[in-house]
Amino acid sequence: MQRSRTFRILTGAALVAALAVWYFSARPRSATNPSPTETANSPSSEHSTSPGNRLDAGAVADLRPIASPDLPKSQLLRDVITAIEGIHSASDVHKKEERFQKAAASVAAADLPAVIGFLWNKEHLSGTGAELRDRLLQRWAELDPKAASEWVSKQPAGSMQTDAINRIARAWADVDFDEAVAWANQLGDENLKHESLAQIAYREARTNPLAALQLAVEIPAGTALDNLLAHIGPLWAVTDATAALDWAKEIANEVLRESVIASMLSGMGEKSPAKAAELALDLLSAGQKQDDTLVTIIGHWTQDEPEVVAAWVMQFPKGKLQETAIESFVPIWADRDFEHVSKWVNGLPQGLFRDHVIGAFLPKILLTSPQSAAQLVAGMSDPVLRQREMDFLAQSQPAK
């Protein structure tokens, strides 16, 4: 019995000793001599995140300048991390923006490549870090677009590089339009080149719409070009419609020519809708482009002269164009002056025009008087349209 008890004691002691050896051998050794990589990529000791020494938002707000020249680069990057943490912990959007501006302005121009490169690495990236990177890249592009573009061109292809190149294109266009265009044209990737040219054209359109349009026609047809022309055309047409349209008429490609003219007339319609509407009928081929342009123009025109619009649309030949115009102006007019529209509709002669007007007016009158809506539908002359609107009324009835 005594021997067995002694054996158990010895066995227990041995087990405890073995566990102690395992614990101290498995536990990570103290980082008394951190590697250079650890030094560059981890917060300094005074920025420890231990519970007793954690930085709060107020402390981060008083950071020393990020790019103090007497600090080694590893310290620079550690301070960038600290700044990002401070931005992320800001209590409101105004404080966050203040810290963003401070962090972006505090990086010395000579250190921009190093800091942007550090934040380019996805390992260090967060939403806040990505935004700081973009702000720093914007600043670099404004200071030295050539150097920024050379650096970005050496980065791996992908969405980050594309976004950076577009950012540089916009900044460079503000500094020197001709240099920006020359740079974009030498880009090896055709998609990148066309995207950059589009960004440059957007910026130039603010001050020189003609130069922007001349640049835009170098971009292949597609949604991107349509959006660009829709932006530029109205800007020029508002200031000099005659010159803008004369230039557009000379575009050889018919599809592109109509897109440019349509965008110009849409812009012109804000100030001179009657003239723009007549030009749309004269310069645009019948079809969806003409219909869409007229709808936009009529929308502007109806705000000022709804009765004139109504009389003008009545002169259209019966067909899709007239129906599209009716569907455009009647609801807008009804929203502005419901009673006047009601009297106008009741005074129209029987016929297809009145039937289409009732169809466009029906959703508005149904909200106030379902009985009046039913009477209008019953008086429609075209049996097909009458049945269509009767079906609409039936579907609009509340479920019992």
Image (spheres, grey):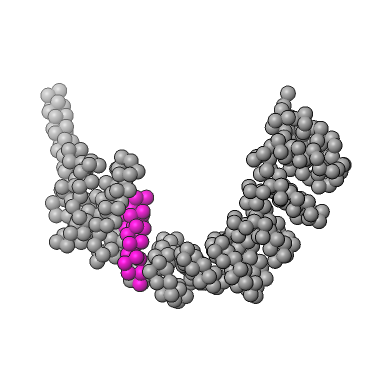
* Left or right of residue 140: residue 278: right
- Percent x, y of residue 192: 48, 68
What's the residue at 12%, 24% (across, down)?
2
Q: Magenta stretch: residue 139 in it?
A: yes
Left or right of residue 344, residue 61 in this image = left
In the image, 47 versus 179, the foreground residue is 179
Q: Residue at x 17, y 41 (%)?
A: 53
Q: Position of residue 393 (x, y in %)?
A: 77, 34
| Quarter of the figure with residue 107 | bottom left
Figure quadrant of the N terminus:
top left
User: Height in image: 14 above or below 129?
Assistant: above
Q: Quadrant where the C terminus lies?
A: top right
Residue at x 81% of width, y 47% of height: 353
Counting the numbered discs, the total is 0
Residue 380 appears in the figure: yes
Q: Report the residue at 34% width, 57% height from top.
A: 135
**Observer-nearest of 105 and 148:** 105
Classify residue 87 as left or right of residue 202: left
Determine whether 258 is above or below 85 in the image.
below
Q: Which residues are magenta?
A: 119-146
Instruction: Answer with the quarter of the image where residue 377 lies.
Output: top right
Main secondary structure found in the magenta portion: helix
In the rendered view, would you say 335 is above or below 115?
A: above
User: Is residue 102 part of the magenta span, yes or no?
Assistant: no
Front in this rendered view, residue 221 or 316 = 316
Q: Position of residue 328 (x, y in %)?
A: 69, 48
